[in-house]
Image (cartoon, rainbow, N blue to C red):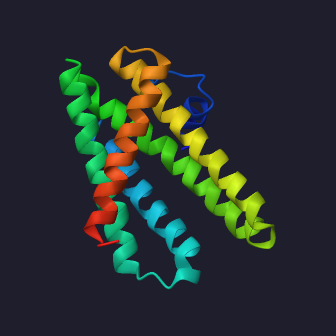
Amino acid sequence: MKVVLQMFWRICLLRQSPAHVPSESWFVTAVVIANLLTSVLVSSLIASEANESLISISTLVLVNQAAYAGLLWLATYLREVPDRFTTTLTAIFGCDLIITALYGLVDVAILSSLDDRFQLAVQLGYGFWGLAISGYILSKSLNVQLGIGVLLALGISMLSGAAGYTAIGA
């Protein structure tokens, strides 16, 4: 477990290529499920003040991640590297798991007691970090420059987010 967390952490720090991520089906399934559960838990903690239902939060997360996976598959297919889809998906979801868990800890422990502007700055920082990580992973997996990878990550995130919010009618 420690080796897996270190691997994802090194990718989060842009120090390791996603090519080393295992692609066994049990591992991919475990990472996807852990990311789904962590995202729902953290989103539920954050949205508790807004009285969002667990069903709408779960639907949002599930549709968002399914759309992300579908768009990622399309990107790997169009770049003619479909064999990299599984490792790329696992790397992105594994890193998202770490970022989401860290953000959840920071939000629960610190953010709620701080000024709204500082909360926004921390949220933007986490958002840009996540975008940089996804862009880095996409650039390595799709053999494109980092800037192109970041733009692809931004586009995929926006489209998958739109799909999630459309699914819950927001």
Q: Residue at position x 45%, y 67% from top? A: 40
Q: Residue at x 27, y 31 (%)?
A: 85
- The image quarter containing residue 10 is top right
> Residue 67 appears at what percent x and percent y?
27, 50
Q: Is residue 110 left or right of residue 91?
A: right
On the question of residue 84 being in view, the answer is yes
Examine the rendered structure and indicate whether residue 111 appears above or below residue 138: below
Picture quarter with the N terminus:
top right
The percent position of residue 79, horizontal first and vertical second, equals 23, 19
Residue for point 36% across, 31% down: 88
Q: Looking at the picture, tell me which residue is in the foreground, 135 or 105.
A: 135
Extreme residue in the bottom direction: 51
Q: Is residue 23 visible?
A: no
Q: Nearer the viewer, residue 14 or 162?
A: 162
Left or right placement of residue 116 versus residue 94 in this view = right
**Side of 32 where 129 appears, left or right:** right
In the visual, does 119 lie left or right of 162?
Answer: right
Above/below status of 146 relative to 155:
above
Image quadrant holding the C terminus, namely bottom left
